Image: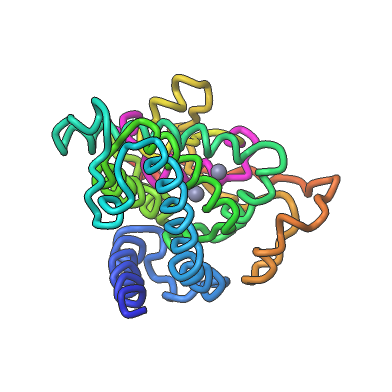
Amino acid sequence: MSQLLFSLAFLVGLFWLVEHLCGNKRGQPWRRPQMLTDALLYAFDALVTKPINLVLISVVAVLFLVPLGVISWEALKAGQYQGFGPIARLPGWGQFLLAFLLGDFLLYWIHRAFHGGKLWRFHAVHHSSERLDWLASVRGHPVNDIFANALLFFPFLLLGFGPGAAAGAGPALGVFALLGHADVDWDWGPLRHVMTSPVYHRWHHSKDPAAMDKNFASFLPLWDILFGTHYLPRDRKPGNFGIAEPVQHTFWGLMKHPFRPMPSVPPPVPPARQVLPGTADSTTVPP
Ligand SMILES: [Zn+2]
Ligand SMILES: [Zn+2]
């Protein structure tokens, strides 16, 4: 519990500096609507969802590795598992790099899958924030998070990655997940098509019809460029966040959201925030 509070306090302080000193929250109060809802979801993720993920991953690893003779139960229990096959023989940095790139590629397709069919109702919870900032990044349904983590983990297990490589790549990608939602107009200038930025992912959350089902990438925009889902206009900034369907912005309202009937007619969508040359906003995005 103390670790949870420490990490929350660290992130609150860090992103207060980012958003209130360098971002779009300059001069705004530190509190915003639905902050308590998102804080509860942060706690639920740390105390419930992540432990379930860990148990699930451990059970599957045991059921796969021990019967196939990759490692004995005793050695696994003693924490001696280091992967298997050619990937496990790579140096640590090579495994980390490969895990990071493979994880990023898999996350693109997992994320894209959650934008269709029945999976969307669970992912819609993540997209329901209308005041998008770093804390909104933790808004998610546990079914979304557990299912996505399982889909991400199984290929790593089958390919023989050591636990260290996957454990390092996860937090590295997680940093971009937090930063990608921050209320800043950063797009990394000349590197805007090389790695994802807050502007990049905030477009993913926009209700603007042109931005719908775009920018699925976690780190490399390359995946969106290759698979036809890239959207990064230079003359506008992302705005008008949220989803078309009605949402109850409470902890239990969001938990129950995927199981509510889907409304047949979505409300109209206003355009995203415009940036006009010469305005104060236009100076925050490098040309
Ligand atoms: Zn999404
Ligand atoms: Zn997001």
Front in this rendered view, residue 223 or 107: 107
Residue drawn 31% across the image and 30% down it: 194
Q: Quadrant of the C terminus?
A: top left
Front in this rendered view, residue 262 or 132: 262
Q: Is residue 196 magenta?
A: yes
Does residue 234 appear to the left or right of 204 in the view shown?
left
Residue drawn 35% across the image and 77% down it: 5
Residue 137 shows up from this direction: no
| Quarter of the rendering containing residue 196 | top left
Q: Is residue 194 magenta?
A: yes
Extent of the magenta region:
190-212
- In the image, residue 192 lies at what x, y percent? 33, 33
Rendered position, 118 above or below 34? above
Rendered position, 173 above or below 31? above
| Quarter of the rendering containing residue 19 | bottom left
- In the image, residue 175 lies at what x, y percent? 32, 52
Residue drawn 41% across the image and 59% down it: 24
- In the image, residue 241 lies at what x, y percent? 58, 51
Judging from the image, the colouring scheme is rainbow
In this figure, what is the number of numbered marks? 0
Residue 107 shows up from this direction: yes
- In the image, residue 122 lies at what x, y percent? 64, 51
Does residue 6 appear to the left or right of 226 in the view shown?
left
Residue drawn 53% across the image and 52% down it: 146
Q: Quadrant of the N terminus?
A: bottom left
Q: Please, which residue is most extreme toward the right here?
A: 264
